[in-house]
Amino acid sequence: MLRFEPRKNRSKFLEISAPIIAVIMTMIFGGLLFYLMGKNPFEAIKLIFWDPVMSPTFAEYSRPQLVVKAAPLILIALGLSFGFRANIWNIGAEGQYIMGALASGSIGLALYPLQAWYIFPLMIIGGILGGLIWAMIPAILKIKFNTNEILVSLMLVYVAEQILALASVGFLRNPEGLGFPGSRDLSKYSSAANPELISGTGIHLGVISAFLGVILLTYFLSYHRTGFHIKLIGQAPRAANFAGVDLRYIIIFCLGLSGGLAGVAGMFELTGPAGLINIDFNVGYGFTAIIVAFLGRLNPVGILLAGLLMSLTYVGGELAQFMMNIPAAAIQVFQGMLLFFLLSTDLLVTYKISVKTPIRK
Amino acid sequence: MDLGDIKISLLLASLIVAATPILLAALGELIVEKTGVLNLGVEGMMIFGAIAGFIATIETGSPWVGFLFSILGGAAIAFIFALVTQIFRANQVASGLALTLFGLGLSSLLGHSYTGIKPAAFSDLHIPILSEIPILGVILFQHDPIIYFSILAVAAVYFLFRNFRLGLILKAVGENHDSAHALGYNVILIRFGAILVGGAFAGLGGGYLSLVRVPQWTEGMTAGAGWIALALVVFASWQPFRLLIGAYIFGGVTLLQLNLQALGLEINVALLSMSPYLVTIGVLVFMSARRSRGSLEAPRSLGKTFFGL
């Protein structure tokens, strides 16, 4: 029999090495998967993890892509991690991301072709509010009726996708688009555009916001009372109850934060890399961000690194798709595996395992 | 608007077809949750069952082999969840999400070369005499074997938890795993088994989707059916027969929505397509609002990890 004892002092070494073990395990099993598909596993792994950053032929294109894809993942995962700490499971970030983009896009398109300095800030506010209000639906239902926020936030993803479809063929369609679905290209509308700030780096305002978010939320988690309460609920719910932590406030805060950040991520994506609202605007960042949050051990700095790593699997995955004809779905399997290994290795961090000899009668 | 174009008896018959995948998946999840495990990976298990059954049917030409593989596929992928949550004691919510992501990815990887093919038809089983009854015969007794199985399974699960020792043991584990352990039951082993059974049911539901309901393979074809199944368990307050009613109501909403789209009414297609999800939210709110006044019917150890004494 195995015996599990909660660790009194979490070892820093294990805390850091557990995700690394998980990544290595994923590489081994992922390599096996590629081998079964008839591909050279070493070449595939190198193409995914090494070439996007180091290869002289690809890195020039891949490196900027790396930060472009990491930014929304980090922004969304930062928000989600707060809720996950307090056992508040917002898994509908994908929907909040869409609604943020739609809200900010509506503002931008309504003001088109006016040129003014206030349009972009207004769109940022719109993006935050769009995601935040969408996330308030599960929050308020949970507080008022104790409705399960996991299911409600997820159902709202499907609803948001339908609204997105409605917008791209209907109320936000480009009037000069010859009847094709999709809105005007906001990245070509200078008052609303979110361009690359330093050419060749991929850095846009969303990337900078992600970095700022990491710093601010690290501080918030360590020094602010609400940050402390969130940690307390996760680690000792009874103690939090006795200490008078208002759970309703925490629910509103966590869902609001994650919704707002997902919404603003959608806004930056819309006005920059994506450019326009279309049926295929969302590509699953909201779901991948869940993995990023866990990979980063729900810690802002960890999430920064995890976001970059996960972005690497996307960019490297595209490269593998292009060079070795490995389908994109293989990368999704890869990411799913990573999450499984992470969750499994967590046991090593939180519990001390020893072998117990059963008592004989 | 002319509803006369939709023949009511045929509509009711296809309502049952539309409801069956969700019913099967929800029934499996009900068993799992009764033992105190919350497996949020229903969507992943369903879609993996859908592709496993589809490939087997295409390769062998027999839908029966297909359904067998759906069941095995669902159980196989649930095995990973069981391993991670029961042996490695990982968080069930996060592991369930991982299972969904993993299942969706793996199924589209495997199904890559199977899009656009039609599987061998699965013939209906007309029950003698009963299927001759006017109207009722068409609605109830001219279906395929899986539908009869799903209804029998609901009854079986009902009696399992009501009349059998095994059902009581499962409930004991779900209500209070420490007491069950103290009584000498192997909590981990029982939960492990229940997760596999739940996966088998979800897999069969998925197989029904790709082999009968659609019948075709398209990437991400479950489109939230697994999540609706999860909501259905809450709606049914963990009671099998309520699950049956709930599933048929959802089947009705889905079907009505599709039929209204086909009629080309002035109602927007997007608004119709989002209706099943909105109805699910509405039902969840209704049920939880009612419940907050009374007592909670959820198994008391639901979602809690058992670490042993």
Image (spheres, rainbow, N blue to C red):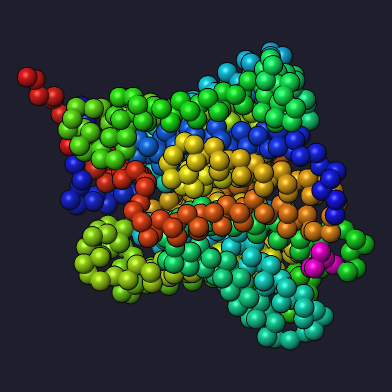
Rendering coords of residue B137 (x, y %): 71, 26
* A54 sits left or right of B35 in the view: right
* A241 sits left or right of B40 in the view: left
Please name the residue shown 31% across and 58% down the image.
A234
Q: From what the image shows, is residue A298 above or below residue A184?
A: above
Where does the N terminus of chain B fall, quadrant-wise? bottom right
Please name the residue shown 17% across and 33% down the image.
B182
Residue A260 lies in what quarter of the image? bottom right
Where does the C terminus of chain B fall, quadrant-wise? top left
Please name the residue shown 32% across and 71% down the image.
A246
Is A296 magenta? The answer is: no
Magenta stretch mostly in which secondary structure?
A: loop
Residue B293 lies in what quarter of the image? bottom left
Rendering coords of residue B42 (x, y %): 52, 38
* A239 sits left or right of B213 in the view: left
Magenta residues?
A170-174
Q: From what the image shows, is residue A121 above or below residue B118?
A: below
State the residue in front, B137 or A359: B137
State the residue in front, A197 or B74: B74
